[in-house]
Image: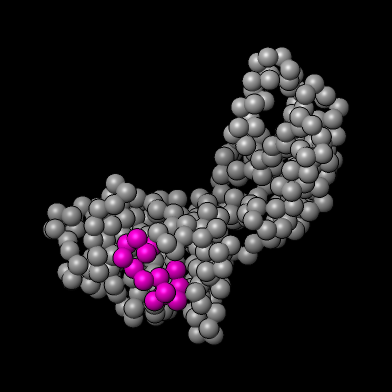
Amino acid sequence: QGERAARMLVRAIRGDYKPATVTQRVPIISPTVLQWTGASPWMDLVQRALTWEAREPDVYVNFFFSFPFADVPDVGMTFQVMTNGDPGLARRVADDMAAAAWRQREALIGSTKVHTIPEGVALAKQAMASGAAPVVLADHSDRSGSATWILKEVIEQDLSDVLIATIADAKAIDVLKARGVKAGDAFDMEVGGLVDESAGAPVRVQGTVLAAGEGKGQLWVVVQFGRGNVLVLSRYLVQVMEPGSLSGLGLDVSAFKAFAIKSRVHFRRGFDDSGFARTILLVEPVEPFLGTVRLEGLPYQNVDLKKFYPYGDPKFP
């Protein structure tokens, strides 16, 4: 795509490509965690755009599924089409893409189930008991990396063989580094939370340090606790996108039945498309904090959700 864009830019500079663009908004607003293009129906829109680009010379289709956490008037799904001096063609393609999205609006919004964290952890426990492991618990909403909601539920619901990676806690990391933390040390600290209300309260973890070391610009501390559970502490938010990155911490990923990670869709390639996980559960806190799929719980000032599907009944086109 980069080479394609560069070639078009050179042509435009030479005067061989005269951009004619059309932008078409669609009154659909969706949480980013739903916008996974690795499967239908979101993939269908990608394929439709690629079909138009293959069918018509010099057509470029861009689409923006919407970033609902921007409280701006022009939020929402948008298609932009560029052609070589043919605004009529650009309009036809933009209208076709918009109409296709509108026809699939119910499927788009209903494509992914998101559970509250207590529900998700309970479902993970059931899946593990029924042999449907490995399980991925993906907290898509944690923006700080410090949220302790899953850790709290893993302890309270007494799960075993769960790898939680990671909880960000710069203060704990600094304390441990000052102590000269090493494998075999006893561990008894409150971790996580406190960054803001979405992170929850700190949770006390008692266990043993399995490993500690520098890597990728920060100190990593791996703690074993409970019945075969492991917690990875980091200085800042880390999105674990594939099991192999956990192996790099000296962990045997085959020893775990569940993986609790902080990610929206980025983990799909390594855990889902690869066939690694048998059960995938997207989760978020009970309350609708920033990052939630329950957009009606956010204090918008510049966006009227009733003007967008599925929160209202807008007319389109």
Seen at 74% across and 43% down, the residue is 50
Q: In percent of the image, x 71 and y 47: which residue is there?
A: 46
Residue 216 on image: x %, y %: 32, 49
* Magenta highlight range: 246-259
Please report the residue visible at 39 percent of the width from the left and 51 percent of the height from the top: 237
Q: In the picture provided, is 307 more to the left or to the right than 244?
A: right
Provide residue 34's location: percent of width, then percent of height.
63, 55
Query: Nearest the camera: 27 or 83?
Result: 83
Location of residue 148 by image quarter? bottom left
Q: Is residue 140 visible?
A: no
Quadrant where the C terminus sits is top right
Quadrant that contains the N terminus: top right
190 is within the stretch colored magenta: no
Relative side of 57 to 233, left or right:
right
Q: What is the x, y in percent for residue 53?
A: 76, 38
6 displayed left or right of 185: right
Quarter of the image where one finds residue 73: top right
